[in-house]
Amino acid sequence: MTEDTMPRASRDLKDTWALEDIYAADEKWEEDYAKAESLVKELPAYEGKLSSRDDCLAASRLYSAVNRLIENLFSYARMRRDEDNSVTRWQALVSRSEGLMMQAGTAGAYMVPELTACPEEYLKGLIEDPDFEPFTVRLTEIIRNKPHTLSGPEERIVAMTAEMGSAASTIYDMLSDADMKFPTITGEDGQPLEITHGNYIPTMMSGNRNVRKAAYESLYGTYRSFASTFAATYASSVKSDIFYARAAKFDTCLEASLHPDMIPKEVYLSLIETVHKHLGALSRLVKVNAKHAAGLDEPAYYDLYVTPRDGFDIALPFDEALELVADCLKPLGEEYQELLRRARKERWIDCYENIGKSSGAYSWGTYDSHPFVLMSYKRNFDSVSTLAHELGHSMHTWYSNKNQPFEKAGYSLFVAEVASTVNEVLLALELLDRHPEKNAQLFLLYNLLDGYRGTVYRQTMFAEFELEAHTMAEKGEALTYESLNDLHDRLNRLYYPCCTPDEWIRWEWMRIPHFYRAFYVYKYATGFSAATAIASRIRSEGETAVADYKRFLSAGGSLPPIEALKLAGVDMSTSGPVDKALCFFEELLERYEKLCAE
């Protein structure tokens, strides 16, 4: 039994998250489920009465209470399922909470259309009413969304489709995380190595090209064997996006997706255009790294992750890694550092991989709990950086929940990657300052540059994939695995013209779970750009910049995302931050190229 295939029951308790902080026992979950179910049944009683100030207030408070309970129910159930996707008990709780979510959406579907039909003066009066203070953002959005709001009966029908709308994502998760099994290859040490989601990227960092190629071909060969299923699943997801966009009277899925965050589509299109202007630098990075790390003049796609072996890495036990992260983030203040240490002491973090555990990493939680982090820690710099990243999400959530009411605490996905990336950038730049020796500089510069490659360039390429796939479907073109393969292959050739084309990269799109949250990935790129600007300001201006940054963290969803970022001194309505971030990338690349040439 290896660490990667260890049963969850064998894990040390301190290395698992304390989900009992949400519900100490299943009986408590059932009590809240029954309570929420009862409250949902009360929602229809206010239909037709929202033009009355008192009834509107009562209905708003009731709906908020329902959503708060359901957030606890669903988050707990889903995180339990993510511990081991094969446990049917947790699958059942997820299904029940999703069903209750749909019931609540259906029961309260009249609220937005009914309020939309009210005179604007009445809604503005509610916004000025102190008792409605928690609901001002929602009321403001109702006014803004009037052109995209349906009648009460129509909204109720749309709400009833919620569970069907999420079916493609659920099927993808079950197929990818629970049912699919990958082959065993010969690892770098000559021993059998079973490929998993958690060890795939570390394996692709191997210095042994045969190992990288075997892992690459075995992974995508497995996805290829499910090609028709993945294509049908993704096509269903895109069709769902089109349905919801057209039901809400948007011309395109992109416009529908950007509307809630008040992001002009020019921001999305400008990101792609700006990145295209800097694609030459991406090829320079791939070529210099392939030569330096592996002695290759003609890199392949499976060489993109090869890590230079310069005799330096951050290979620490988990506790030491967390302490290093906290120490490197000293510029953010003692309170921030103490919160990071609390995350370990109070078991916010589920550290290691186990059989059936969901792949990847995330920070989640509820308004009534502290944040939680899921990851599969390995003793390498990549995992240390991932830890810093996810704890950045957690700190954003902690500050938002502390300073905003439940109704305003949830921040936009547009800013969701900013705090996480600020942590990553500060960590990398601090380590560069601490380790002037050549081997450390090469290693750390590469990892920072590769962060740009993976977060700005790669996510923008995925953003292009999503945009073109949705555009194809909106035009009535079929999304088959052949058409999606062709699209993904073309984009890889555009972004990586220096790589030798092969038959395997065409299947890569099947491995990307974020595609089931349409038009989300571009926010990694914009978030990284904003974070670079914020981190630079924190390092140069100190306490003033930190105070502004914490104002941003504390704003939650009380401001539109672009306005919230302005609190931290960044204006994402222009192309400036992305262009400056990529110019900084090119400065770092020049340093790396010079060191490699020495």
Image (cartoon, helix red, strand yellow):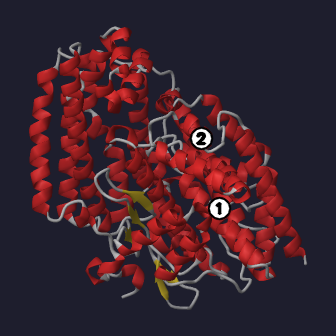
Specify which label sits upstream in the sequence, 1 or 2. 1
- Any mark on residue 567, and which? 2
Q: Is residue 204 left or right of residue 233?
A: right
In the image, what residue occupies the spot 67% across and 79% down? Answer: 209
Other-residue count near label 2 (Cα within 10 Å), few / some / many at <14 / 14–19 / ≥20: some
Q: Position of residue 20 (x, y in %)?
A: 22, 66
- x then y, percent, for residue 131: 28, 27
- The residue depicted at 11 percent of the width and 41 percent of the height is 37
* Residue carrying label 1: 425
Name above or below for residue 392 compared with residue 467.
below
- Under mark 1, the amino acid is Val
* Tag 1 and tag 2, C-beta contact below 8 Å: no
Which SS class for mark 2? Answer: helix
Q: Is residue 3 visible?
A: yes
Mark 1 is surrounded, within 10 Å at the Cα level, by few (under 14), some (14 to 19) or many (20 or more) other residues, namely many
For this orientation, the residue located farthest to the bottom is 190
Image quarter of the C terminus: bottom right
Residue 428 is left or right of residue 130, and the answer is right
Q: Is residue 214 visible?
A: no
| Residue 62 figure quarter | top left
Front one among 279 and 185: 279
Q: Amino acid at mark 2?
A: Leu
Local secondary structure at mark 1: helix
**Viewer-nearest residue: 1 or 258:** 258
Residue 204 position, x and y percent, is: 60, 73
User: Percent x, y for residue 167?
Assistant: 31, 44
* Residue placed most toward the observer, 314 or 550: 550
* Image quarter of the N terminus: bottom left
Going by the image, does 36 lie left or right of 246?
left
